[in-house]
Amino acid sequence: MKALRFAALGDSLTEGIGDPVDGGWRGWAALLADGLAPAGTPVEFRNFAVSGAQTAEVRGRQLPDALAFAPDIVSVVVGVNDTLRRTFDLHAMAAHLDAVYGAFAGRGAIVLTACLPDPGAMLGLPGALARPLARRQQAVNSVVHALSERHGAVHLHAAEGDWVADRAMWSVDRLHPGERGHRLFAARFHAVLAEAGKAHGPAPDTEPQRPAPTRSAALRWLATAGTGWVARRCTDLLPQLMALAADEVRHGLRGTGARLDLRASAGVAAALSALSASAAAEASGAVS
């Protein structure tokens, strides 16, 4: 019997960080794989995701190997790392995502996408620092929504809801789901796939098999690995983030904060418009 092939692309969320198993990480995609096919149909699962990956790396490094795998179903969940870099470029992100979604959809694969929570809120940053990151993540999510619709992807709305505020869902670093969170993420993906008639096996179990991290474990992480993580992000992002925060404060004092939201919305529209113009130019060239 022909196996159903499932490929997962993305960053540390899809790699499985926060859901440890013997010898490595498991994660939501591996949990979802078991529920995609009916009983008796084997599933071949390949996880191409790499911790720290940005959209450019998904397109340049993961996409070729995943296309060679020829998946029937493919998940592409990425973008948070882009928002945490001073090189953030929404136009480039949109182009990379459009190319990746289109490559799989053009081969008849079912594409899975998701919008994600704001990293500033997850880390508990002060308002003036958190709002610029929130605006970036909202812009990314808007692009993902639009491109998911354009390519007929199965999309999971994961940016909001009770699960985001529930600390039991998250690992000690506050950015990655813990085992319970990964299980819920997998179950929610299974639900939208089943509703679309694309998942035919049992839903993943949402009950974790390991205890949730304790507060002391969170403090140990922050004092050891977490310190290095924060330092790396600060070196790359903090100078720009401080400038963005200063701009946020200035607009707040003037009562013109809405301009920043309008600017972000205009950026989303411009990025999507550029893709449409590029597609039209390619179509025109093909006809001529």
Image (cartoon, rainbow, N blue to C red):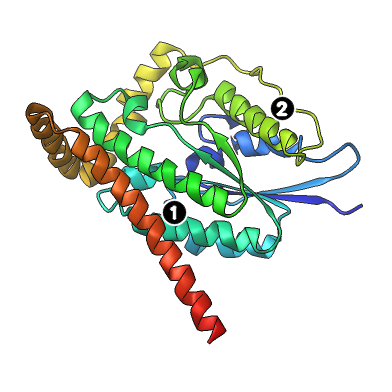
Mark toward the start of the polypeptide (2 vs 1): 1
Q: In the drawing, what numbered circle is on residue 55?
A: 1
Residue 243 drawn above or below residue 119: below
Q: Is residue 222 above or below residue 92?
A: above
Label 2: how many Cα within 10 Å (few below 14, some 14–19, many 20+): many
Going 39% across and 59% down the picture, which residue do you hit? Answer: 273
- Classify mark 1: residues with Cα within 10 Å, few (<14), some (14-19) or many (20+): many
Q: Which of 158 and 13 is in front in this view?
A: 158
Q: Where is residue 211 in the image (x, y as percent from the top left)?
A: 57, 14
The amino acid type of the residue labelled 1 equals Thr
Q: Can residue 33 be seen in this view?
A: yes
Q: Is residue 13 left or right of residue 45?
A: left
Q: Residue at x 50, y 82 (%)?
A: 285
Q: In which quarter of the image is residue 200?
A: top right
Pinpoint residue 19: horizontal percent, then vertical percent: 56, 29
- Label 2 sits on a secondary structure element that is loop
Q: Name the image quarter holding residue 194.
A: top right
Which label number is shown at residue 204? 2
Amino acid under disc 2: Pro
Q: Can residue 58 be seen in this view?
A: no
Helix, strand or loop at label 1? It is helix
Residue 65, given in percent of the width and then of the height, sits at 61, 62
